[in-house]
Image (tube, grey):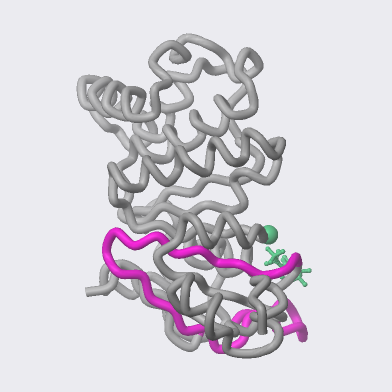
Amino acid sequence: MSSLTIHDLRKSFGAVEVLKDINLEARPGEFIALVGPSGCGKSTLLAMIAGLESVSSGEIRIDGRLVNDVAPRDRDIAMVFQSYALYPTMTVKENMAFGMESRGVPKADQEKAIARVASLLQIEPLLRRKPAQLSGGQRQRVAMGRALVRDPKLFLFDEPLSNLDAKLRVEMRTEIKKLHHRVAKTTIYVTHDQIEAMTLASRIAVMHKGVLQQFDEPQVIYERPANIFVAGFMGSPS
Ligand code: ADP
Ligand code: MG
């Protein structure tokens, strides 16, 4: 069964249709990159998967369950944004515990989850710090940690590295790749960076003006782009 299935999904804001008949699926453990120019509808699609935007028509299924009308907190997903959205007055550890606390996870289990994820991301030395005492890369790692402690079914990223400088972006890209190998969590990763998509994803969904142009493995997208837009955007030779 697919971890995520999107069937004929549409979204309009008033009279403006921003997503048109999107069909996508992610297999368990798969890393999917969603790419396209600014304004093409990437964040809207991700927000709909997360339950932060309503569905105009079509279906979203997580592990086979129709979630169109399921509240965000009951979807078993975790999301990492480009703005880290860490709570500034809380320590790193408290930031990581917050979601579990509000869901009533017992303290001992919280501790275990935090220890596991902190070790995975190598952020143990940061647990007592406040967000202001962290570098950009460290904050992003903590934001990922906070998402991972929930052990979600689906991991959603919306341009998580776009606020980082070029060198750090490349480092974090490698870290995300390693992390994905270790946790094998189904991931939908929004980026406008073609290289990020090519290096991270098992399949890439290329969007333009609310329409899914191609959904294929990186090599296929590169060697056999479906149309001139995909060829141009993904930098293929044709
Ligand atoms: P991307 O993430 O690919 O840059 P978005 O999903 O943010 O694109 O936006 C897609 C389109 O939907 C844009 O034209 C944007 O202006 C429009 N849009 C997004 N959110 C809203 C909203 N809440 N109300 C009206 N239009 C919106
Ligand atoms: Mg966006």
Q: Nearer the viewer, residue 157 or 179?
A: 179
Q: Nearer the viewer, residue 219 or 15?
A: 219
The C terminus is located in which quarter?
Answer: bottom right
Residue, x 53% and y 78% (percent of image)?
A: 221
The relative height of residue 108 versus residue 186 in the rendered view (above or below) is above
Residue, x 44% and y 14% (percent of image)?
A: 127
Residue, x 36% and y 47% (percent of image)?
A: 180
Residue 95 spot, x, y in % from top left: 48, 25
**Bounds of the magenta span?**
9-38
The N terminus is located in which quarter?
Answer: bottom left
The relative height of residue 227 versus residue 77 in the rendered view (above or below) is below
Horizontal arrangement in the rendering, residue 213 relative to residue 117 (left or right): right
Residue, x 53% and y 67% (percent of image)?
A: 48
Residue 206 spot, x, y in % from top left: 59, 75
Horizontal arrangement in the rendering, residue 81 relative to residue 189 (left or right): right
Ligand 2 visible in quadrant: bottom right
Residue 154 spot, x, y in % from top left: 37, 56
Magenta span: helix, strand or loop, mainly?
A: strand
